[in-house]
Amino acid sequence: MTSKNVLAVAALIGFLALAGCSAPVTGTTAATGAAPTASPDSSVPSPKPTPADLVGEWVEENGGDSTQSATITGQSISINWVNAKDGTTAVYWVGSYAAPSAAGDFTWTSTRDEAATDGALLASTDPTKDFEYAGGKISYKVTAMGVTKTVTLIRK
């Protein structure tokens, strides 16, 4: 064997040895072919669940021509009847709102703002109204013309 052949065989053996020892370039482990998994780092705390932020605009889920929409601010909730056909709105409820202090489902009782609702023909005259927040939706009962139904609002 010539010195060139010996050199070529040695280079080939060296190349194969290096290639066999290196990790695959595809991002998988050599033994299983699966993507490597990160080990959980117990020194990093899990984020704590936070209370829902309900402030903003809400609209009735599955509403038709006559629906309700709500606006929640830091301390109040205002709900209007909305007539989609003619673009009119009428006050239904204006009352207090207390934001949730813990994560998860949430209920609150709103006290009606009499000054804001007494002159409104279609406004509720109930002194309080119970609201529930669950699954990303707000629900409450509405009674009009002797018929009671549950209205469900979704974020606009």
Image: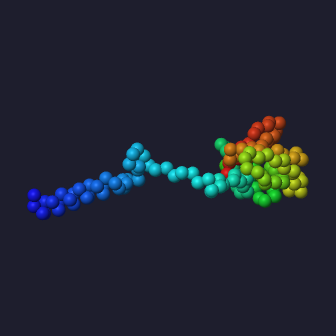
Compare residues 108 and 72 and report the one nearer the observer.
108
Relative height, residue 6 to residue 134 (above, below): below
Name which residue lies at 13% across and 63% down.
Answer: 4
Name which residue lies at 81% across and 50% down.
Answer: 93
Residue 156 point in image, percent of width and height:
66, 53
Residue 88 visible: no
Which picture quadrant has residue 41?
bottom right
Which quadrant, please, contains the N terminus? bottom left
Compare residues 82 and 50 and report the one nearer the observer.
50
Residue at the top extreme, as displayed: 147
Position of residue 139 in the picture relative to residue 32 (left or right):
right
Which picture quadrant has residue 75?
bottom right
Which picture quadrant has residue 45?
bottom right
Compare residues 26 and 93 and report the one nearer the observer.
26
Residue 2 point in image, percent of width and height:
10, 61
Name which residue lies at 12% across and 63% down.
Answer: 3
Residue 104 point in image, percent of width and height:
72, 47
Residue 151 point in image, percent of width and height:
74, 42
Numbered label tally: 0
Residue 139 visible: yes
Name which residue lies at 87% across and 47% down.
Answer: 128
Q: How is the image coloured?
A: rainbow
